[in-house]
Image (spheres, rainbow, N blue to C red):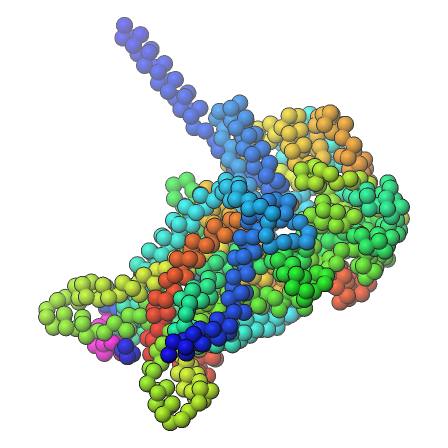
Amino acid sequence: MRRRLLWRSVWSWIVLAPLLLVTLLPFAVMLSTALKPHDEVIAFPPRWLPTHLDWQNFVDMWSAVDFGTGLWNSLVVSLGGTVLTLAVSIPAAYAMSRIMFRGKDTYGQFLLITQMLSPILLVLGLFRMAASIHIGDATLVDTRLAVTIIYAAFQLAFAVWMLASYFTTIPAELEEAAWIDGAGRAQAMLRIFMPLAVPAIAVTGIVTFVACWNEFPVALTMLRDPARLTLPLKVVNLVAGRYSVEWNQVMAATLLATVPVAVVFAALQRYLVQGLTLGAVK
Amino acid sequence: MKLARFGLLACAAFAGVALGQQARAETVHMTVSYYSAATGPYFEKMAAEFHAANPGIDVKIDVVNWDGLLQKLRTDISGGTNPDISIIGTRWLLDFVKDDIAEPLDGYMNADFKDRFIGPFLKPAIIDGKAYGLPIAASARAMYYNKDMLTKAGFPNGPATWDDVATAAEKLKAMKEPGFGLMAKGTEVDVYWYYALWSYGGDVVSPDLKAAFASPAGVQALTMYKSFVDKGLTEDGPTNYTREDLQNLFKQGRVSMVITAPFLINQIAKEAPKLDYGIVPVPKGTTSSTYAVTDSVVMFKNSKVKPAAWKFLDFLFTKEPRVEFTKGEGFLPTTKAEATDPYFTNNERLKVFVDLLPTAHFAPTVTGWEDTAKAVTDAVQSVYLDKAQPDAALKQAAARADESLGK
Amino acid sequence: MSAAVGGSRRRAIPLAPWLLILPSLVLALVIIGYPFFEILRLSVSNVSRFGLVRGSAGLSNFATIFGDPIFQNALLRTGTWTFGVVAGTLLASVPVALVLRQPFYGRGLARTIIMLPWAISLAMAAIVWLWSFNADYGMINATLRELGLMQGSVQWMARAETAFPMEIAVGMIVSIPFTVTILLGGLSSIPGDIYEAAAIDGARPWHCFWRLTLPMLGPFINIAVVLNVIHVFNSFPIIWVMTQGGPDNSTHILVTYLYELSFRLGRPGQAAAVSLAMLVIVFGFTALYMRLRNKDPVA
């Protein structure tokens, strides 16, 4: 039995090897370039290993890119977007998974259609809309609030889908038992359903968070003031249209912006698989 | 007694109002394009100095990459959130004027102001007799060559004509050394070819605003470039190289000749100080010529703080601010005052660029420049990739350009 | 745990469900609806370079676009791109999911690594790949040279013949984690006893896969295809960062051409027309696909 496991492990790794290598390549490149001193970045022929590890690049990059500000802004819009998404999606998913109502299919199709419109198509209109809403002296443009709201609107279709598919695996009988015992519908939902739904909500929250963290076109159009830029914007700014690009700093920034999220996300992927199980199709 | 107290109160009130007036500061928003790491700090410094001298006016600076500048401005204008003043590429100016977005500046200038500028640089920003922009950055283009390589190829003082370039590159190729740098990716692919076009007496746009580059001069120029690519006299895969890439190659001695702007001087000094290089005019075909480019500052019509914004511009275009900017970025002086600064008069390398100005071509002030640029870029790329012949490609590009030029 | 199908109450309570979906409906309608109508308006208007609307243009924007050879090529290429990435992703994801389904030593680590691309911003991933493919300083050429597989340098991004396949490959790499996750979910929903029954009947592994696994994975493959097609069709950063749709428009797909029209060439009216064309295509595909497979992918 153990021999079979060993044998299967070996050939599993062999089969997966090409994909694993290709997946890890960008990270290796990032690490290698980020640690190179400036003149080795465009040395020819290029080498994987720098002559010495230039950790200073990370420090330089942090101040050159104002990484801390970008980090904070990304956190604000991602958390805000996630909370707002969950706030509107949980009730909707509850309805979708529990209740047959007229227009349910239409609503489902409407959600799917919202996914078909790429943000690139909509950014100009979004911008004009934000520019027409005045708050005090300024408009909604260049505010993290606007970005947060837009993110929630774009993420909710996927969140509803994920949550609904998970919710259908939670037996309705538990709540019905509570109704029979005289609990109100809302009470039953809160006290019996919600605790069971927490894993689903957590997983959906993480996926939404990551999507907001990595989003680019909407943030690019809406945010201007350097004090409000998110991380992807700051990183791309280092590359786009510059007379001369500091690749080691770009790679250091990309690495720092990516790795923490990637690690958390990947470590929780097991729950992700469970979350997308079943109920995905009735 | 009562009168005195009343008087005191009145004074206090009056003082309060006066102070209040001053405390109500005006804010001027300025968008600047990113030229180098020094750009942001420079403008912040200027904003601070100006504010110290004019406490009632606050200047806010927004630095934007060139890549996204036009897009940002377009989005902002369509949303009504544009800045008060902004740096733009002068070649975009006519579009701004036609859409009635740019403010004519003559009314703000006194007689001396116009005189501050070096004539040829101010001209491109004058449309229908009115000045709409002030030249803030200027550069011309010349040929940088690697002295070691070119001496080996028999041209110790650099190539003078395109035939020289070809001969040198062939000798270098035989010695397995790199040759002529040709860029065909990113922005200014069209301009890189215009160097050759103009040197054979051709032009991009005719006086009656039609595409003029599909002329015999154009075909000759493009055929020549293509032959460079085909014979391996350029770096491998030109469509993979932007101007930035080519400059990197040059700094490392992996390309021996490249045509670009003065700011490379600063870059080489910082990154490859041991490189032995020279600067000569763009190679001659039948005539001598180069490309001169200005970026202008414009004021937007919908600005609510025009006098304040103008005051800041006035300040920016005095001697010290100008010298600091132009020197730091590696540009050419646009005002007469800066040009007298010893840094410029004693600078051998910059002198080459400055001497080229009398015969320089500026980008024509015409609408549809972006479309023309794209049409030409597509055409030359397809020729370098062996997908089309110069004659046919240029004719097609001219047809495409004519759809937008002057409209 | 067996599938708890149902849980849907047949008792129709008119008000409550609408209240529950109302916030999401309002949010989506406002944020997505408004720009959508804006696009509709722009597509039939004469729009200046600065987005100022100057009167109606009827259908001339559409006519110009459909007659534009760059648009036509981009349309075809978008088909190639979408098909290439989605099919490739699916073909790669099925075996990967099958392997990851069974326990083996270090499975958690393998799963973690395979999921990594999902966590990277597409724009940043594209930048890293662009740098890796750099002909002079990129690691791909360097590694190929060190392994002795190559002498000179391949100019990957110089021509569409080499650039486009690589862009498709990158597209696949970033889509695999999501697809594998869906397929794993599907696989874990297949009850194990049917395999035992089949084994008793003497069925061999290949038969098991083809006749049992694949059909039961059907609905999950459907979702993966539909969602992937929608995302890949609209996927902008990879191609834009690596080649900007060039050289000579040879790697343009509809969404990158749309971007160029709108923000580089200053033709928002035509860009809006392209957006609408794209929406119709994606919508048409989804409707057609769903009808053919006769399943509603939304729970």
Residue at the bottom extreme, as displayed = C201
* Relative vertical location of residue B377 with respect to residue C88 in this rendering, above or below: above
**Front residue (pair A13, B153):** A13
- B20 vs C159, left or right, is left
Which is more toward the observer, B373 or B283? B283
Q: Image check: A168 left or right of A253?
A: left
Magenta span covers which residues?
A: C5-15
The residue lying at 51 percent from left, 26 percent from top is B51
Residue A95 is left or right of residue C49, and the answer is: left
Q: Is residue C77 magenta?
A: no
Image x and y of residue C101, in percent:
40, 75
Task: Give the x, y percent position of residue C242.
Answer: 61, 59
Task: Note whether A8 is above or below A243 in the view shown.
Answer: below
Of the 4 image quadrants, the one containing the N terminus of chain C is bottom left
B22 up-or-down from C117: above or below: above
Instruction: Give the position of the C terminus of chain C as an image quadrant.
Output: bottom left
Which residue is located at x 68 percent, y 52 percent? Answer: A44
- In terms of image quadrants, where is residue C71? bottom right
Q: Is residue A177 visible?
A: yes
Image quadrant where residue C155 sits: bottom right
Q: Position of residue A132 (x, y in %)?
A: 44, 49
Q: How many marks?
A: 0
Secondary structure mainly formed by the magenta segment:
loop
Q: Closer to the camera, A39 or A210?
A: A39
Please tell me in which quadrant of the rendered image residue B140 appears.
top right
Residue projecting furthest to the left: A181
Q: Is residue C269 visible?
A: no
Question: Which of the two residues, A220 or B101, is positioned nearer the viewer here?
Answer: A220
**Residue at horizontal 55%, vertical 44%?**
A54
Q: Identify the residue at the far front of this view.
A: A3
Instruction: Give the residue drawn at x 23%, y 78%.
Output: C10
